[in-house]
Image (spheres, rainbow, N blue to C red):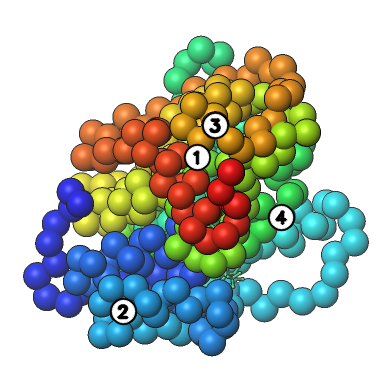
Amino acid sequence: MTTRAVEEKERVCVTGAGGYVASWLVKFLLLKGYMVHGTVRDPSDEKNAHLKKLENASENLQLFKTDLLDYEGSVPNPEARFQVDLIEPAVVGTRNVLDACLKAKAKKVVVVSSTAAVGLNPNWPKNQVMDENCWSDKEACKATEGFNSKDYRGSSVSYFTTPTDHHSRVLKTEALEYAEKGELDIVTVCPSIVIGPMLQPTINASSLLLLALLTDGHKTVEGTDRPLVDVRDVAEALLLVYEKPEAKGRYICTSYQIKMQALAHKLKSMFPNYSYSKSFTEDDYEANLSSERLQKLGWKYRPLEEILRDAVVNYEEKGILHKA
Ligand SMILES: NC(=O)c1ccc[n+]([C@@H]2O[C@H](COP(=O)([O-])OP(=O)(O)OC[C@H]3O[C@@H](n4cnc5c(N)ncnc54)[C@H](OP(=O)(O)O)[C@@H]3O)[C@@H](O)[C@H]2O)c1
């Protein structure tokens, strides 16, 4: 780990602690000697049991029951769903966490956003690399299928992971305005599609990307160019921006851009016996995102082969994939 050593037990809070990204973050924080307060919706739920088994958890991890929203009732029409499924968890949840951070006089807040808040911008010049100045356009986001999908519903949290500043400037006003007003020291990290081994017992949405490639032999898969990043590298990025006092604003966190067909080919060369998709749709979209700003801060990412190997071995060990 490239970040600083913790001299005395520094206390940090990770919201949505049992989630895919957050679990790795909790693991790294505990390994570094931090005292971690994790918020989960149900501390006694089996799906959070892995947290208590992490190294140093018995002394340094406390879980607290917290729901970021008081959200009830069904929402019939798509426009309202958009508001309630995505914007409210993001805006209300972020505001609640930030208010709590203000009250607790938090030293620093790291918000997990997404490259979905960066890359859906039809007005960005083609061929120009998308950097932190690029903000997704709200209408373009609404028009994309993924936006209303439940993949992005339970955006998570924290002094580390919070409901994201997803997809639009909406949350700029909710998260970064706190920072602009000088009320809180806030940094946002925008990961691309997160893959790699899971610590949590249940499959999270983005892990389905690899799982589908390994098992969907008979299906046609979208041949899109995907920006990818390893879950451990995302957790390291969150730690890095937390620990570096000079970290400010937004950081894109992505390491590879690869067409799904090429990804399947790579996986097949490493694990030849799975039932790989043979048919891919044509798509000329090219992701063009840069993590140069994060790399300048000291972030490094692991090789793609290592990510894929560790992910597949993890799925096999968990019994999600039956060794072919
Ligand atoms: N995975 C990716 O590819 C990816 C890419 C870019 C950005 N992100 C962002 O990174 C963050 C973490 O993603 P992830 O993949 O780790 O997601 P995940 O595994 O689904 O974890 C989400 C966490 O948020 C918690 N949560 C959701 N709604 C909540 C609420 N109302 N109150 C309290 N907790 C709530 C969930 O708790 P329960 O277990 O109780 O549901 C879960 O622990 C999210 O904000 C996501 O949008 C993820």
Q: Earlier in the sequence, mark 1 or mark 4?
A: 4
C-alpha span from label 1 to label 4: 17 Å
Dot 4: few (<14), some (14–19), or many (≥20) neighbours within 10 Å?
A: few
Foreground of the two, 174 or 22: 22
Q: Secondary structure at mark 4?
A: helix
Residue type highlighted by circle 4: Lys
Task: Find out if the beta carbon at label 3 lies less than 8 Å from the nearest ligand 1 atom.
Answer: no
- Of the numbered discs 2 and 4, the one sitting upstream in the chain is 2
The residue tagged with tag 3: helix, strand or loop?
loop
- Rounded to the nearest angstrom, the CA distance separating label 3 from label 1 is 27 Å
12 or 151, which lies in front? Answer: 151
* Relative height, residue 264 to residue 115 (above, below): above
Query: Could you classify mark 2 by the number of other residues whose Cα lies within 10 Å: few (under 14), some (14-19), or many (20 or more)?
Result: some
Whether disc 1's CB lies below 8 Å from ligand 1 is answered: yes
Q: Quadrant of the C terminus?
A: top right
The part of the image, by quadrant, that contains residue 182 is bottom left
Find residue 281 and report its horizontal and vertical position in percent.
74, 22
How far is disc 4 from disc 3 in space, using C-alphas?
Answer: 32 Å
Residue denoted by label 4: 150
**In the rendered image, is residue 141 in sight?**
no
- Could you tell which of marks 3 and 1 lies nearer the N-terminus? 1
The label shown at residue 57 is 2
Identify the mark nearer the N-term, 4 or 3: 4
Q: Which mark is residue 192?
A: 1
Residue 46 percent across, percent down from the top left: 56, 80
Determine whether the residue tagged by mark 2 lies in a helix, strand or loop: helix
Type of residue at label 3?
Pro
* Residue at 63% over, 74% down: 69
